[in-house]
Image: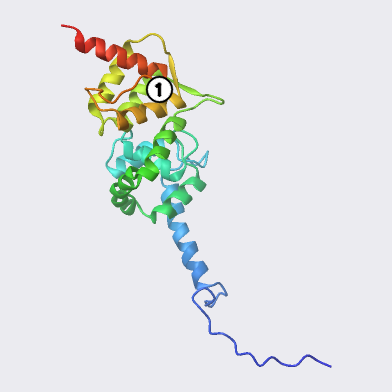
Amino acid sequence: MPPRASKRKTAPPNSSSVTSSDGRSVFSKTKTKGLGKIDRLFNSYANSSSGEIDPDGIVALCSDLGVDHTDVRILMLAWKLKAAKQGFFTQDEWRTGMKALRVDSLSKLKKVLPELEIEVGKPSNYEDFYAYAFRYCLTEEKQKSLDIESICELLNLVLGAQFRPQVDSLIEYLKVQSDYKVINLDQWKNFLRFVQEISFPDLENYDSGLAWPLILDNFIADFIRTLREP
């Protein structure tokens, strides 16, 4: 016997199933259109040979955004894009980041930069951003540490605005000390812990008996000795 016809009523089409004359869903076309605008923005700065936004493209992007390429907000943008390689944005990274930011034009990207600063500043995000800043600067395969000059520049960029006295003193020490040529990620993370937790410049809650890296113990000893000098 042939199957009996179903008596169930067909559900009315919803927004994801409405089709246009070409058979494609309206939802799909809208999504594709949005992605197309994101890709066009990417292509306006990408190197046509490599298919990536390279350092020259980032400089051009910064110029159009009205910010310097060394502005910390560009590092925040790289964090949002989850960019893996310093000075380069891939198309996939760009798509992911722009969709997360709800941005598909230069004007929208310019407007969202202040909001990105607020997002990064949240305690739940800041430690991740701070660690990312270190990893982003690792440009060689299997590289685990950064030279002192790079660390000083990064400290100034990432922490300088919030913790200027501590950062200035720490940079001054790092430049004159001779025991360390490079800084690893654990030491870098403890620099953040130090400026967030330790009262400065009185250091009244600093306890050398706690698990601080030796480089910070040495910094404190040098700082105290400098204060006591006539």
Residue 1, given in percent of the width and then of the height, sits at 84, 93
Three-letter code for the amino acid on which mark 1 is drawn: Trp
Q: Is residue 127 visible?
A: yes
| Number of numbered discs on residues | 1
Q: Is residue 63 above or below residue 192?
A: below
Q: Is residue 208 above or below residue 33?
A: above
Q: Residue under circle 1?
A: 212
Residue at 43%, 13% in the rendered image: 181
User: Quadrant location of residue 209?
Assistant: top left
User: Quadrant location of residue 198?
Assistant: top left
Q: Quadrant of the C terminus?
A: top left
Which residue appears farthest toward the left when viewing the image? 230
Residue at 32%, 36% in the rendered image: 72
Query: In the picture provided, is 119 more to the left or to the right than 136?
Result: left
Of 41 and 96, which appears nearest the observer?
Answer: 96
Q: Is residue 55 visible?
A: no
Q: Is residue 166 above or below residue 2?
A: above
Residue 44, given in percent of the width and then of the height, sits at 41, 47
Residue 144, given in percent of the width and then of the height, sits at 51, 24
Of 70 and 187, which appears nearest the observer?
Answer: 187
Circle 1 sits in a helix, a strand or a loop, which is it? loop
Applied colour scheme: rainbow
Of 71 and 207, which appears nearest the observer?
Answer: 207
Of 100 and 227, which appears nearest the observer?
Answer: 227
Residue 70, given in percent of the width and then of the height, sits at 32, 32
Mark 1 residue crowding within 10 angstroms, few (<14) / some (14–19) / many (20+): some
Q: Is residue 147 above or below residue 176?
A: below
